[in-house]
Amino acid sequence: MAADSKKVLYGLYNDEEDLKSAIGTARKSHLDIMDVLTPFPVHGLDPIMGLKESRLHYLGFIYGAIGATFGFGFMSWAVVSDWPILFGGKPYWPVPAYIPITFELTVLFAAWGMTLTFYTICGMWPGVQAKVLDNRITDDKFCIAFNVTESADSEVSALQAFFSKTGAAEVHVKTI
Amino acid sequence: MSQPVAPVRHILIEGNKSYHNITEDLCSPTEKAPSREWILAFIISAALLGLYVFAVCWTVWKGIGSWNLNRTINWGWDITNFVWWIGIGHAGTLISAILLLFRQRWRTGVNRAAEAMTIFAVICAGQFPIIHMGRVWLAFFIFPFPNTRGPLWANFNSPLLWDVFAISTYFSVSLLFWYTGLVPDLATVRDRASGFRRKMYDIFSFGWTGSAKHWQRWESLSLVLAGISTPLVLSVHTIVSFDFATSVIPGWHTTIFPPYFVAGAIFSGFAMVQTLMVITRKVLRLEEYITINHIESMNKVIVLTGTIVGVAYLTELFVAWYSGYIYEQFAFYNRVFGVYWWSYFGMMFCNVVSPQLFWSRKIRRSIWWTFFLSIIVNIGMWFERFVIIATTLARDYLPSSWSYYSPSWVEIALFAGTIGLFFVCYLIFTRVAPVVAIAEVKAILKVAGDQYIGPNAKAHGHHGGHKSAPVKEDKHED
């Protein structure tokens, strides 16, 4: 067993509306939710869980700006400073002709930068072994998980009471 | 309780599915042994792909002289095929990106397959600019890289170089967008699998668990990728049209080309989506996900873009006449009544006349008509590119170099071969990944937020004969 393995108590709900009201209850009674796992993006979940908005799109803007600067700067450097060539009497620095490639590189950098950042901050990569609590979470079950590695028995039974009160269809303990 | 819900909201997924039904329906094609139709289609496609490989080897070994191009007509089937394939690719991005921005929720039924089509079509398109260079082993010269000749950089003023950047960016961004959308669904397949299959899907699903924070980031990423793919897809065909429009050839040197090419691309792409969807939904039994309403919506896009394309054709003729410029006038006279008149009339009939049948609701909602007309439109759009390229070049400024061109067997084999390449990719895709976006379909299953799909749903009257009811009004009691 790996050193960072956790003992997880999790409950499965059958409908996202049950899940949402259960999360509301958990937050009201100050239960420390480890994670909420769903088969699809459930709308309205973030404010109930108190998740802050993702800042990924700001990074997308920064990556795009880097791409634009790099593309435009490189082309300008290549034809103005490194090897100036006169193409059919046109100006040495034909800025409008650089718009297409500058645009393409903006998109390319923004897309790749954001996607790679997304996988990195989510800890996802080819070959990463998914810590699957339950196979049905990617099918039709909505899961609330609590970390009970260091919890006292009384805390665990409080969580179990919470699950039965909020209508969880199943409650399990698993070490991942 | 009942809430005011707009009565125009119709159900998008038919058959009163539960979440589990969706998983079952959409994952099962990847889990069963391939059907006889699939095997037959794969054998035919693989044979065509073999023909393609042979024709490429022949071209590389013998040289471009094995094609029937000549000094006058130096672009023929090669660039026609390139523009045709790249145009087809555009519909996938339109469906997945532009319809996402417009919040068209019906797109979830078809976006996955359409995006896959985009990627495979761009792969096919990318073949032609490379093999038409002749010395394919020097194809890397198109990239600006530090070299021993100075370094001498590429010509950044050239639309052909812009195309290199546009197509490669388009391909890689489409691939990211598609694959990131696919990751949660691959995790669904993984969690149903065991043994070696599970190991494989474990690798390809990147360790996806479905955590709420991951979903939030995933949605943010999808939205931004859609936002930047939208101008990207418009830029790609605009730049393809610049390959022609920035030249000084009468008939090519027109400012109408960018919007006209983009409309034509969406037009042909939707036709190809229809061709594929009509077959896919039947063979994989996905009629409840890719419904007649989807087909009708796409047919509406076809009639709109087909009409835009028709207006563009007529505008070209008008502007040629109105310009008072004899070379321009001759170029268009020659297009209509010249040696290639048959391709012009073929184009007009297939692209402008035939889609008008979709004004009829009955034809729009008929599978057979849709399939038939989608093939006609694909043929018509191929003719359009042939008309633009070959007829224009065949009659240049110097009458002594006027020429005629018909393809050699190598060029025909290359075109037929890319169709094989396309279908080999598509058929493999239908076997290894869910062709409908599972997670996205689940997210739109409920037409109203207060609808309940739990174990007690039956008691709440949600699973019994609600096929046509657009709104479910009752809410479960907590």
Image (tube, rainbow, N blue to C red):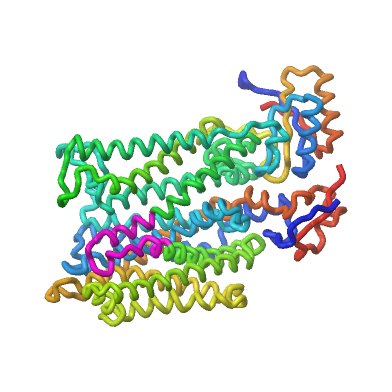
What is the x, y in percent for residue B117? 47, 57
Q: Is residue B448 visible?
A: yes
Image coordinates of residue B130 in percent, x first then y, are 28, 54
Q: Quadrant of the C terminus of chain B?
A: top right
Q: Quadrant of residue B215?
A: top right
B229 shown above or below B252: above
Q: Is residue B249 magenta?
A: yes
Front residue (pair B40, B229): B229
Q: Is residue A78 left or right of residue B295?
A: left
Is residue B363 shown above or below B203? below
Q: Is residue B414 left or right of residue A14?
A: left
Question: Compared to A138, does A10 lie above or below?
Answer: above
- Identify the image quadrant of residue B50: bottom left
Q: Is residue B310 magenta?
A: no
Residue B398: image location, x then y, percent:
14, 72
Q: How many marks?
A: 0
The answer to whether residue B57 of the structure is visible from this angle is no
- In the image: residue B190, left or right of residue A139: left
Please state if B52 lies on the left or on the right of B92 as rendered: left
Farthest-out residue, left: B400
Query: Residue drawn at (20%, 62%), measured in percent from left and top?
Result: B64
Query: Could you tell me which residue is drawn at 57 percent across and 58 percent down?
Result: B110
Towards the viewer: B45 or A157: A157
Range of magenta residues: B236-262
Q: Residue at x 36, y 50 (%)?
A: B166
